[in-house]
Each structure stands twice: as structure tokens, then as C-alpha cells.
């Protein structure tokens, strides 16, 4: 006889939601249809808490919802002016630490970072732009790596290892010296075994990893965030489906 796992409950913004043993706060809230802002979390891939946007207050203590286990009786604050203001500041820093040229980026309208800025009411960068000089890797015949947009979420790193079984990418360095690298002898994508069908080639939430020869296929009005808001649950499936249609 198979016994169903016992459901317990957490309370988030005065809403009681169930969870089962092993779920994180993010797992439980997404299953209940409650949105916590995030960029580096993707269902089915090991969470790492890199972007910090999912920080919530758990019994008064700030914790990353994607890596913190749900526990019975937790009282969680999520959609508050203070937390959303902190998330907006984090999003502003992601913009000024890279070279995000939204009006001309082919990811515009399909970009979760851009959609997050809209969601949080971000109207400007606030902090001085850093205009970093970063290497663009166009060596691969079908995939391009533009580190100008990389926000170091590491989704491509984890997807390559855990889903594709290839270990194409890694994060090297720390702090302001951290960068996305390619695990080949010369550091170029052309010598890796990445393929356009790999999840690592499609999971990038910004325009750092792009499939070549399919730019701007979807016209304005038909892009993901022309039709959806980022706080809709389950949009990750639409991201991947949209990426696959790019090279159909």
C-alpha cells in the first residue's frame, strides 16, 4: 500500500498553503500558484539562490525561497513594498553591471530580466552604468555567446550538467571578477559539444546565449511578454517552447 506524503502548511502573506517533505518554499508556493519573483530558479534544476530576487522574510529572517526548505508553521512575507523595493534595486544592479541594450536586443519582449523590470516598476538604472568590456564568442556555427548580457544566474551551467550531461559552461572568478566560461581547451564554444537542442542553449533568461540565424522572428505583439506577465506561474515551459520555435 502506497502512503501519500503528509501535507503540512506554511503561511505566506496571510495565505495558508500546503507543502510536503522535501519541498522548498519556492516549490510549495509555485505549486499553490503563488508567485515569488525569481530569475535563476527553473523547475527541475538544482536551485542555487544566485539572483537573490526570491528573498522573502521567514519569521522575520531574510532567506532565499528557492533554497530554503518549507517547514510547518513558517510565517512568510513576500509581496511587501520593502521586499519589492529591494528586488528592484537588485534588478537595477543587474542592468548596470552588464550592457543591456533592450531596444535593439533580439531577446526583447522574450526576456525575463526585462519583464522583471516592468513587474517591479523599474523606470531607470538608478546606479551608474559600468559598461563592462566582455568577450563575445561567435565561434560556434549555430550558437552565440554574448557575455555582455550574462547575469551569472548559472542556469546554463546547471542545465548543461544536470539535463544535457555535457558540462559545457562554468562560472569562473568571484565577485566583480566572476564570468561565464566555456569548458574547452581554448575556451571557445566551437570546440564544445553543445547543440541547439540542448537545454543549456535555450534556458538563458537574457540574450547571453542565442541561436544564430533566427533573430527577431517573432514580431512585436507576439513575443512572450507581449502576451504574458512574468508573475504567471509555469512560464518556463513557454520560454523553452519559444526557443525551440526559433529554429523550426
Image: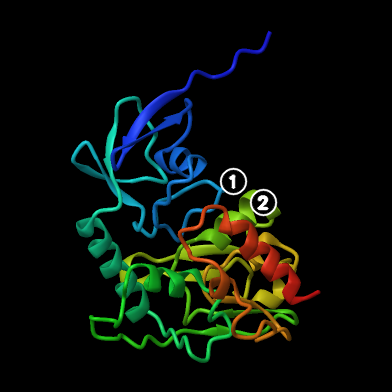
Name the residue located 60 percent from the left edge and 64 percent from the top edge. 203
The residue mark sitting in front, 2 or 1, is 1
Q: Is residue 29 left or right of residue 128?
A: right
Give the total of numbered labels.
2
Name the residue located 61 percent from the left edge and 76 percent from the top edge. 223
| Nearest the eye: 72 or 139 | 72
- Residue 24 in view of the camera: yes
Residue 18 lies, with reference to residue 34, above or below; the image says above
| Nearest the eye: 68 or 221 | 221
Residue 174 percent across, percent down from the top left: 35, 64
- Residue 168 in view of the camera: no
Residue at the disc numbered 1:
44
Name the residue located 56 percent from the left edge and 68 percent from the top edge. 204
- Counting residues from the N terminus, which is met first, the one under dot 2 or under dot 1? 1
- Helix, strand or loop under label 1: loop
Q: Which mark is residue 163?
A: 2
Label 2 close to label 1 by CB (< 8 Å): yes
Amino acid at each position: 500500500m502506497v502512503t501519500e506524503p503528509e501535507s503540512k502548511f506554511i503561511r505566506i502573506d496571510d495565505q495558508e498553503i500546503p507543502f510536503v517533505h522535501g519541498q522548498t518554499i519556492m516549490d510549495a508556493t509555485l505549486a499553490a500558484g503563488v508567485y515569488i519573483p525569481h530569475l535563476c530558479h527553473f523547475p527541475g534544476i538544482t536551485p542555487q539562490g544566485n539572483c537573490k530576487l526570491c528573498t522573502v522574510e521567514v519569521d522575520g529572517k531574510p532567506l532565499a525561497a528557492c533554497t530554503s526548505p518549507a517547514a510547518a508553521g513558517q510565517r512568510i512575507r513576500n509581496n511587501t513594498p520593502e521586499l519589492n523595493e529591494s528586488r528592484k534595486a537588485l534588478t537595477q544592479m543587474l542592468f548596470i553591471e552588464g550592457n543591456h541594450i533592450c531596444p535593439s536586443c533580439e531577446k526583447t519582449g522574450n526576456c525575463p530580466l526585462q519583464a522583471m523590470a516592468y513587474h517591479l516598476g523599474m523606470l531607470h538604472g538608478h546606479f551608474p552604468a559600468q559598461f563592462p568590456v566582455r568577450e563575445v564568442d561567435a565561434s560556434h556555427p549555430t550558437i552565440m555567446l554574448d557575455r555582455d548580457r550574462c547575469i551569472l544566474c548559472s542556469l546554463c551551467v546547471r542545465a548543461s550538467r544536470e539535463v544535457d550531461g555535457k558540462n559545457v559552461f562554468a562560472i569562473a572568478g568571484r565577485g566583480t571578477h566572476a564570468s561565464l566560461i566555456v569548458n574547452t581547451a581554448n575556451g571557445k564554444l566551437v570546440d564544445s559539444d553543445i547543440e541547439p537542442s540542448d537545454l543549456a542553449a535555450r534556458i538563458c533568461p537574457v540574450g547571453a546565449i542565442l541561436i544564430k540565424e533566427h533573430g527577431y522572428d517573432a514580431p512585436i505583439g507576439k513575443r512572450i511578454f507581449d502576451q504574458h506577465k512574468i508573475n504567471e506561474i509555469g512560464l518556463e515551459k513557454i520560454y523553452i517552447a519559444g526557443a525551440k520555435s526559433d529554429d523550426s
